[in-house]
Image: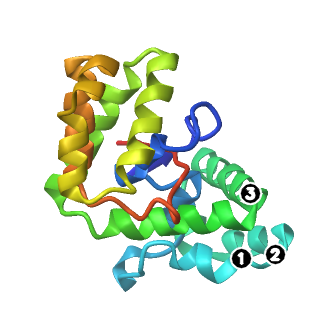
Amino acid sequence: MRFRGRMAGKVGGGVLGLALLLGCASPALAVQRRAVPRGNQHHAGEWLRKYKDLPPDQQQKALESDPQFQNLPPARQQALRQRLQHFSNLPADQQQRILNRMETWEHLTSDQKQQARQLFTQFRTLPPERKRKVADAIRDLRQMTPEQRKQTIDSDQYKNQFTPEERNLLSGVSQLPLASAENEPGGVQPEE
């Protein structure tokens, strides 16, 4: 599984709620997933948690010395260096949200991950203004119980505010395990 962070600054906030609720993590997830040997059954985000408090130059050294990283093609190594640098430049609270998203993603079933990818693909086709509206709705829905989410999506207000396709997208997102809104307000997109 690969992740890309192009959406993080474009729509912000609740998008990914969609995205990590969509199981989406961050550009940094790619560093953790590829730089740490999978055979050791590392917990999602373990590499980043271990090294996130080091200065960026020491993080880079740790990455460079990782055997799994060393076995990657040079272009992939460079991409991961850039993603780690991006992660390192984020505020601590945003780094923590990313790590929390990675944790949430790890606990999704294969079917839930597939559903999340499909929903995010639908989300990406929305025009920018609609993305913002849907992202805001996702952020709001994440603060509700599952019953409240369903009632809200089925409400006249949402029927007037969102197209049937957007409401189907919101319904699909609301059926996935949603991370707590206070812990997960931002996001990025999955790529696979």
Location of residue 65 in the rendering, given as x and y in whole percent from the top left corner: 68, 76
Q: Which mark is residue 149?
A: none
Q: Which mark is residue 58?
A: 2
What element does badge 3 sit on?
Answer: loop
| Badge 2 or badge 3: first in the primary sequence | 2
The answer to which image quadrant residue 70 occupies is bottom right
For the residue pair 175 and 190, the one nearer the viewer reads as: 175
Q: Which mark is residue 62?
A: 1
Q: Which mark is residue 90?
A: 3
Mark 2 vs mark 3, foreground winner is: 3
What element does badge 2 sit on?
Answer: helix
Mark 3 vs mark 1, foreground winner is: 3
**Type of amino acid under label 1:** Ala
Structural distance between the alpha carbons of marks 3 and 1: 19 Å
Q: Residue at x 45, y 14 (%)?
A: 127
For the residue pair 180 and 28, the one nearer the viewer reads as: 180
Q: Is residue 146 above or below residue 36?
A: above
For the residue pair 165 and 64, the one nearer the viewer reads as: 165
Crowd tier of the residue under label 2, counting other residues whose Cα lies within 10 Å: few below 14, some 14–19, many 20 or above: few
Structural distance between the alpha carbons of marks 1 and 2: 6 Å
Location of residue 136 in the rendering, given as x and y in whole percent from the top left corner: 47, 37
